[in-house]
Amino acid sequence: MTNNTTRTLRQGRTPRLLRDTFLLPRGLLGRIGGRLMARNPVQQEELAGLLVTLSPQEVCEIGSGPGILAKLMAERCPACRIDVVDPSAVMRARAERRCRAAIEEGRVVVHSGAAEALPFADARFDLVAAVNNVALWPDLDAGLREARRVLRGGGRVVISWHSATAPDKMQRRLALSEAEAETLTRAMDEVFGTVQRRSLTHSAVWEATVPQT
Ligand SMILES: C[S@@+](CC[C@H](N)C(=O)[O-])C[C@H]1O[C@@H](n2cnc3c(N)ncnc32)[C@H](O)[C@@H]1O
C-alpha cells in the first residue's frame, strides 16, 4: 500500500441486528446466529476437503465462529493441531462445545483474539485459514501481515468467502464485488508476493505460500 489509510473490504456502518447475529455475534442474537451458521455447512465441508490435501500439522483458524471447520479438520486430519481464534465470546463458547472431544485430546484450542492481532508466536503454523470473515476485518493489511507473521517458510494461507457463483442464493448475495475481490488479491500479493484466486463450488478462495527462507 502506498499511503497510511486503513484498508477494509467492506466499508460503512452495519445494522446492529446483522452485526450482533453474524458479524460480531453477541447475546441471544449471537447464539441464534451460531445455530444458523451451522445449519448447512457446505462451505466448511468443501474447504476442509481442500485443506486436508495440504497435509498440515499446525493449523490456525481465524474467525472460527461456532467451530464447524475446526471440528471437521480435527475429524479428517488426525495429525493436525488446530488453534482457533475469534473475538466473540458467544462464538468461542459454541466452538468449545462443538469441538469438546478434540479439545479434551489437546488437538483443538480456542483463543480470544482477532485477525489484526493474533495471540501466537512468529512462525508457529504451517497453515492459516479464514472462512467468511476476511471482509469483517477492520484492517485488511494488518490481518494479512499477522497471517504471514505466524506462518513458517513454506506455510500456506487460505482465505475463503461466499462465492458469486454458489448454488445458494444467499451466498451469491453476500459475495464480494469484483472490485472488492481485486482489492483482496492485490493486498495478498503485496504481503505474500504471490496469490492464487480460484472458485470452488460454494466459495471463492485466495491462497498464498510464504517463501522458504
Ligand atoms: C459469519 S461468521 C463466520 C464464522 C465461521 N468462520 C464459519 O464459517 O462458520 C464471522 C466470524 O468472524 C468473527 N470476526 C469478526 N471480526 C473478526 C476479526 N476482526 N478477526 C477475526 N474474526 C472476526 C466473528 O466473531 C464471527 O465468528
Image (cartoon, rainbow, N blue to C red):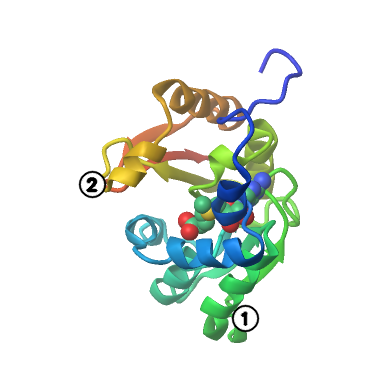
Query: From the viewer's perspective, is residue 120 above or below residue 211?
Result: below
Q: Earlier in the sequence, mark 1 or mark 2?
A: 1
- The residue under the point 34% across, 63% down is 40
Compared to residue 185, the image places residue 27 above or below, namely below
State the image quarter where residue 153 is shown.
top right
The dot on residue 8 is none
Q: Which quadrant of the figure has residue 93?
A: bottom right
| Residue at 55% over, 48% down | 18
> Circle 1: is it few (<14), some (14-19), or many (20+) Cα within 10 Å?
few
Toward the top, the furthest residue is 2
Rendering coords of residue 167 (x, y %) = 23, 46
- The residue at the far left in this view is 167
Say which residue label 2 marks: 167
Instruction: Name the residue that disc number 1 marks.
Output: 106
The quadrant the C terminus occupies is top right
165 horizontally vs 118: left or right: left
Q: Secondary structure at mark 1?
A: loop
**Residue 103 point in image, percent of width and height:** 60, 80
Q: How many marks?
A: 2
- Amino acid under label 2? Pro
| Quadrant showing the N terminus | top right
Could you tell me if residue 185 is visible in this image?
yes
Query: Which one is in front, 176 or 3?
Result: 176
Nearer the observer, 3 or 26: 26
Looking at the image, can residue 57 be seen?
no
Amino acid type, residue under disc 1 in the picture: Gly
Q: Nearer the viewer, mark 1 or mark 2?
A: 2
In the foreground, 172 or 45: 172
Q: CA distance from mark 1 to mark 2?
A: 36 Å
The x, y position of residue 125, in whole percent, is 61, 56
Query: 174 or 49, which lies in front?
Result: 174
